[in-house]
Amino acid sequence: MPFPRPTAIRSSIAAATLVAALVAAQSVPARALAHWNGTGQIIARISIYPYNYNGTWMSPLDRSLSNWNVTASPAYFYKDTLSSSTLTVTSYSDTWYGYYQACGTTCMYVRVNSRTINRDASNFSNFVTSVVVHELGHALNLAHNDLTSIMNHGRNRNSMTTPQSHDVADVNAYY
């Protein structure tokens, strides 16, 4: 009986490896539930240039950073005078509450619309925190979704102020 050629053995091993990989891939849960937009920062540790507003605004703004920092995820937001990322509160004529914009892979602008928040919030502090936690979610590459999530555009901003389990899972899966 002749011995198999080395190329035939390698082909058989490669085919067996491919079959094993396909079987393993089918047993791994699909990431279909992940909601990423890929427009955020390349790292989850994000600096923000120190902002300074009156106490009415400072507490909910700072709490927004902390609400991400205490999650079981790599998300960490901190103030640094060397940062080119900013968090700005002012009155905009637009209808949005908050707006995230990337200015590079490690730079972001978060804008908070004081006009619409003052008009619509019944719990001012919670509303501000919810808006900023949501915008920071975009910095972490999270996209809008329809789940129980800080990234749900229709969430109750007067009561939901923290990233929810789905948000944390998405950040963990992304980073």
Image: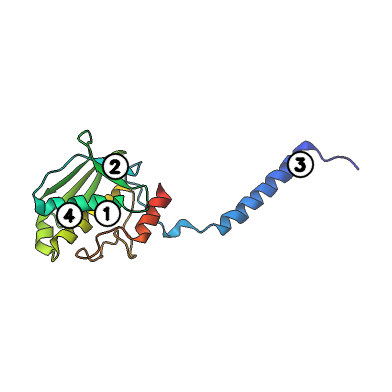
Give the label, 3 or 1, closer to the camera. 1
Q: Is residue 106 above or below residue 36?
A: above
Q: CA distance from mark 2 to mark 3?
A: 50 Å
Determine whether the residue tagged by mark 2 lies in a helix, strand or loop.
strand
Query: Looking at the image, is mark 3 or mark 1 earlier in the sequence?
Result: 3
Q: Is residue 93 visible?
A: no
Mark 2 surroundings within 10 Å by alpha-carbon count, few (fewer than 14), some (14 through 19), many (20 or more): many
Disc with the residue nearer the chain's start (1 vs 2): 2
The amino acid at mark 2 is Ile
Of tags 3 and 4, the one toward the viewer is: 4
Q: Position of residue 171 (x, y in %)?
A: 37, 51
Can residue 58 be seen from the camera position used here? yes
Alpha carbon distance from label 1 to label 4: 10 Å
Give the mark nearer the N terminus: 1 vs 4. Answer: 4
Residue bearing the label numbered 3: 9
Q: Residue 130 placed where, x, y %?
A: 22, 58
Q: Amino acid at mark 3?
A: Ile
Q: What residue is pinned by disc 2? A: 46
- Amino acid identity at mark 1: Asn
In percent of the image, x 26 and y 61: which residue is there?
Answer: 153
